[in-house]
Amino acid sequence: MSKAGIARSLVILSVAAAGFVTREAQAQAQAQGLQFFAVTPCRAADTRLASYNSGAFLNGPPNMQAGPVRAYFVKGKCGVPDTAQAVSLNAAILNPTATGFLSLWPAGGVFPVVSTINFLQGEPGLANGAIVPLKACASPCADLNVVYGNDGTPGKFLDFVLDVTGYFQ
C-alpha cells in the first residue's frame, strides 16, 4: 500500500482518547490491509524528563521551542515494532508560553494542512488523541515529526508528552 493510501485510510479512522478503536475504524483499517494492535498506554516522549533521552532515543528535554521541527522516536518504544505503519497516540502540551498549535506527521513527510492540537497561552495542560502515520524505517530511527507553531513570536516554548495507545501494521 502506498503512503498516500495509508494516509487516506488513517484519516478516516477514529480513536477515542482512552485508546480504543471503534468497530467501524477496525473494519476500515482491515479493508485497507492494516490491523490495529492495542498496547497498554505507554509514555514514549516527555520533554520534562531527562530519562526519555536514553541511548539512541532522544525523546526528552529540552522543551519544544516554537518553530523548528523536532523528530521523535516511536518505533522500538512502548511495544511498537519496526513494521508499524501508524500509531494511535495521545499528544499533550503543558504550559505553553504562547497561543499556538502542535502538528504531528511522519518524519521526512510533507507538513500536514491540519493541526493535531490547538491551545491558548497559559493553559496548564491539554491533550488530544490522534492516529499518525510513521516513517518507514527500522528502529532506532526518528519516525515522527512534531512542530510547535504560533504567530511567529520567537522564544516561546511548551512541554510535550506523547503516550502511545496502539499501532497499525
Image (cartoon, rainbow, N blue to C red):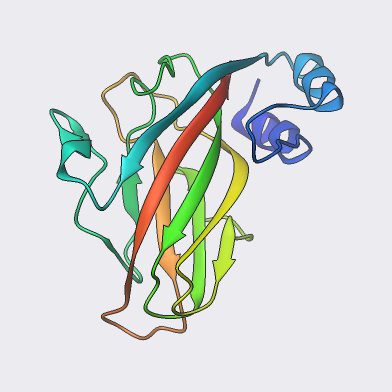
In the drawing, does residue 118 fall left or right of residue 108? right
> Does residue 160 lie above or below 20 as drawn?
below
Is residue 107 placed above or below 36 in the rendered structure? below
Give me the residue at 71% from left, 38% from top.
16
Q: Quadrant of the N terminus?
A: top right
The percent position of residue 62, horizontal first and vertical second, equals 19, 57
- Image coordinates of residue 102 in percent, x first then y, are 49, 61
Number of numbered callouts drawn = 0
On the rendered image, what quadrant is the C terminus found in?
top right
Give me the residue at 65% from left, 41% from top. 17
Q: Nearer the viewer, residue 62 or 134?
A: 62
Q: Is residue 106 left or right of residue 114?
A: left
Q: Is residue 110 visible?
A: no
Q: Position of residue 36 (x, y in %)?
A: 65, 17
Q: Is residue 141 left or right of residue 79?
A: left
User: Which residue is at a point 21% across and 46% down the rendered structure image?
Assistant: 49
Q: Residue at x 55, y 71 (%)?
A: 119
Image vertical order of residue 120 relative to residue 34, above or below: below
Q: Residue 97 versus residue 167: which sits nearer the camera? A: 97
Question: Seen in the image, is 25 located left or right of residue 130?
Answer: right
Q: Quadrant of residue 82?
A: top left
Q: Position of residue 98 (x, y in %)?
A: 42, 80
**In the rendered image, the vertical position of residue 151 relative to residue 58, given as above or below:** below
Asked whether residue 164 appears in the rendered view, the answer is: yes
Instruction: Using the image as rendered, state which of residue 137 and residue 25 is in the foreground.
Output: 25
